[in-house]
Image (cartoon, rainbow, N blue to C red):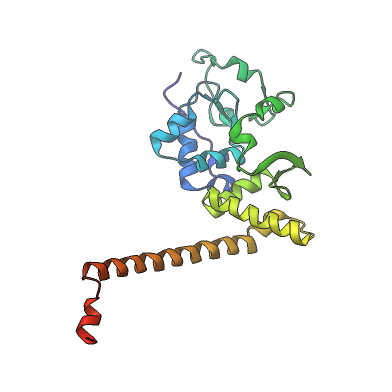
Amino acid sequence: MAQRRMFSLKIIDSDFFIDMPSSSQLLYFHLAMRGDDDGFVSSPKKIMKFIGCSDDDFKILLAKQFLIPFESGVVLIKDWKIHNYIQSDRYQKTHFTNEKSMITESENGSYEMDTECIQNVSKVDTQVRLGKDRLGKVSEGKDIYKERVKLSKEEYGKLLEKYKDERLLEKGIEILNNYIQAKEPKYKSHYHVMIAWVYERVMEDEKSKGHRHERDTAKDRTTEGIVKDGGVSKYTSKNYL
């Protein structure tokens, strides 16, 4: 396997790439540096731990389809051949022949999953369940989360970037799902609702939760101070006794 890798500005200089968090971009570079001569990466989880990236960074790369995942845990850099050209006398064939048999090469040089193999690869947990509440169903080309929320993989990836925490995103999905169940609104795009009032609602709830935590912490400290002072605060004993 070669010790040098290249990156095409067609990919990494695009808004679609730059819009990702810097940590997701970093993970992409590290994965691509460790790909074999066909672009397969054998241990993405180990690389994530090594450089300190989170599962969310990996999921964003999957949601934006910069990576193609396989049931074996191996991932493939989708635009590998756009980035790299390896001379035939230096090329070393990948060991992942089974995974390679599942892909085809598009006209622009990027890899695509063979349509006959998509269903098998969809068993990969990180692809099937980018969110814990995804039902694994598809409607109008979008995945269904909870019972009623429809989002494409790309939309989910963008939302994960905006919410910055999968827990908060799942909370937003639950809020929207419950609202749709109760009110039956006719939304054209659940994605745009998620970045509008649902996002504001989630952030307000988190802010209120933070304020409650601060008040509870202050109350605990006050109680602790009174106990340490023999049950009567110094302020009270000095000014009112």
Q: Is residue 192 visible?
A: no
Give percent across and percent down for residue 42: 50, 23
| Rendered residue at 48%/26% (across/down) | 43
Kindly indicate the quadrant of the structure image that contains residue 224: bottom left
Outermost residue on the bottom side: it is 240
Kindly indicate the quadrant of the structure image that contains residue 192: bottom right
Q: Nearer the viewer, residue 38 or 238?
A: 238
Query: Left or right of 222: which side holds 159?
Result: right
Give percent across and percent down for residue 155: 65, 48
Q: Is residue 126 above or below residue 203?
A: above
Query: Left or right of 137: which side holds 15?
Result: left
Q: Nearer the viewer, residue 14 or 34?
A: 34
Outermost residue on the top side: it is 89
Give percent across and percent down for residue 1: 46, 18
Q: Is residue 126 visible?
A: yes
Q: Is residue 203 above or below residue 62?
A: below
Q: Is residue 171 above or below residue 85?
A: below
Give percent across and percent down for residue 174: 64, 53
Query: Left or right of 193: which side holds 206?
Result: left
Q: Is residue 9 above or below residue 6?
A: below
| Rendered residue at 67%/30% (across/down) | 122
| Rendered residue at 60%/26% (across/down) | 70
* Total marks in image: 0
**What is the quadrant of the C terminus in the image?**
bottom left
| Rendered residue at 60%/33% (across/down) | 125
Kindly indicate the quadrant of the structure image that contains residue 47: top left
